C-alpha cells in the first residue's frame, strides 16, 4: 500500500535546508571502464557543464563475523563544474549526480537526462538500482532544546523527543524507517541531534531516500518518469513533516499548487 500522503503544494524557500541531493543509478559491472581513456566518450557529452575531472579511490568494505574488513580499492572518476556545487561520479558499476547547491527539481532532472545520454553512449543497457536521496539539516535560531522542535516538526515524527518523559536531556535521537512502495522502497532516516552530538549547533536531520533495486532495461524516458514520482513522494514527506512555524522561518518565496 503506497504512503498515505496528501499532495502538498510545491513551496520554494529563501533558506535552503538541503545539505546534499544525490541521484544514483547502478548497472552491471563494466570492466572496460577501468581501461585508460574508456570514459572519454562519457566526458565528451558532459564536459560543457563538468569541465574538471579527477580520479578518486573508492574503498570497498566487507562485513563479516570479525566486523568490517577493507577490500580492494577501485577507482571512480569525478567530473565537476566550476565551483557550482555539482558533480558526476562514475565507476565500473554506478553513476551518481550530486549537488550541494540544489534549487529545484527541474534543474536536477535536466542533468540526469544528460548523464543518461552519456551512459547510453558507453553501451550501458541495464539498470540494477535507481535511487533519489535528499538530505536536509534543519536549523532554527529558537530551537536550542529538544522541546523547542515540537513547534517545528510534526509530533508523529518526533515521537518522545521534547516530551515530558525525556525532557531536554536528549543528546541525539535517530530513527530509520523503511517502507515498501509501488516502485521500490522508501527509507526515512530522521532525528534530533543536539549540540553535543554535532559539536556545533543542534539540527533536525531529515534524510529521505527512494530507491528501486529491481533490474530493468535502461530506458532514459522510463528512468526520468521514475524519478519524477520519487521526487513527488519525497517532497510530500518533507512538507508533511514540518509545521507552519518552520515554513514561516524558512521563508516561502513561491508556492505552486500540486
Image (cartoon, grey):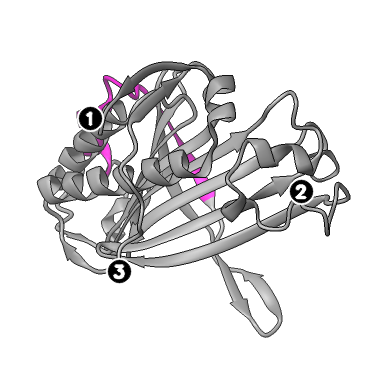
Compared to 215, does 253 lie above or below? above
| Contact (Cβ within 8 Å) of mark 2 with mark 1 | no
Q: Count every numbered label the image shows and give the total.
A: 3
- Residue at 27 percent across and 31 percent down: it is 111
Quadrant position of residue 90:
top left
Whether 44 is among the magenta residues is yes
**Closer to the N terminus: mark 2 or mark 1?**
1
Secondary element type, mark 3: loop
| Residue 188 in sight from this viewpoint | yes
Between marks 3 and 1 in the image, the one whose residue lies nearer the viewer: 3
Q: Name the residue under label 2.
A: 162
- Which span is picked out in magenta? 39-57
Distance of mark 3 from mark 2, alpha carbons? 31 Å
**Closer to the N terminus: mark 3 or mark 1?**
3
Compared to 5, does 184 lie above or below? below
Q: Which corner quadrant holds the C terminus?
A: top left
**Closer to the N terminus: mark 3 or mark 2?**
3
Distance of mark 3 from mark 1, alpha carbons? 30 Å
Secondary element type, mark 2: loop
Of 100 and 245, the residue lying toward us: 245
Q: Give the numbered dot on residue 110.
A: 1
Q: Give the numbered dot on residue 224.
A: none
- Residue at 13 percent across and 46 percent down: it is 220
- Horizontal and vertical percent for residue 227? 26, 46
Amino acid at each position: 500500500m503506497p504512503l498515505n500522503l496528501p499532495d502538498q503544494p510545491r513551496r520554494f524557500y529563501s533558506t535552503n535546508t538541503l545539505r546534499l541531493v544525490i541521484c544514483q543509478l547502478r548497472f552491471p559491472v563494466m570492466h572496460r571502464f577501468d581501461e585508460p581513456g574508456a570514459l572519454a566518450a562519457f566526458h565528451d557529452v558532459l564536459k560543457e557543464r563538468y569541465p574538471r575531472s579527477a580520479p578518486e579511490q573508492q574503498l570497498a568494505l566487507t562485513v563479516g563475523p570479525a566486523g568490517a574488513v577493507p577490500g580492494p580499492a577501485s577507482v571512480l572518476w569525478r567530473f565537476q563544474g566550476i565551483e557550482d556545487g555539482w558533480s558526476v561520479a562514475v565507476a565500473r558499476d554506478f553513476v551518481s549526480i550530486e549537488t550541494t547547491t540544489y534549487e529545484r527539481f527541474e534543474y536536477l532532472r535536466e542533468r540526469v537526462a544528460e548523464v543518461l545520454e552519456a551512459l547510453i553512449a558507453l553501451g550501458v543497457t541495464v539498470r540494477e538500482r535507481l535511487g533519489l536521496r535528499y538530505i536536509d539539516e534543519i536549523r532554527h535560531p529558537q530551537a536550542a532544546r529538544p522541546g523547542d522542535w515540537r513547534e517545528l516538526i510534526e509530533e508523529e515524527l518526533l515521537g518522545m523527543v521534547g516530551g515530558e518523559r525525556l525532557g531536554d536531556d536528549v543528546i541525539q535521537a535517530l530513527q530509520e524507517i523503511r517502507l515498501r512502495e509501488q516502485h521500490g522502497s522508501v527509507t526515512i532516516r530522521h532525528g534530533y541531534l543536539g549540540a553535543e552530538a554535532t559539536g556545533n549547533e543542534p539540527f533536525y536531520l531529515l534524510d529521505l531516500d527512494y530507491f528501486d533495486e529491481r533490474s530493468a532495461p535502461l530506458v532514459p524516458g522510463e528512468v526520468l518518469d521514475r524519478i519524477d514520482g520519487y521526487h513527488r513522494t519525497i517532497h510530500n514527506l518533507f512538507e508533511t513533516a514540518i509545521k507552519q512555524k518552520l515554513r514561516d522561518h524558512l521563508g516561502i518565496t513561491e508556492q505552486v499548487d500540486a
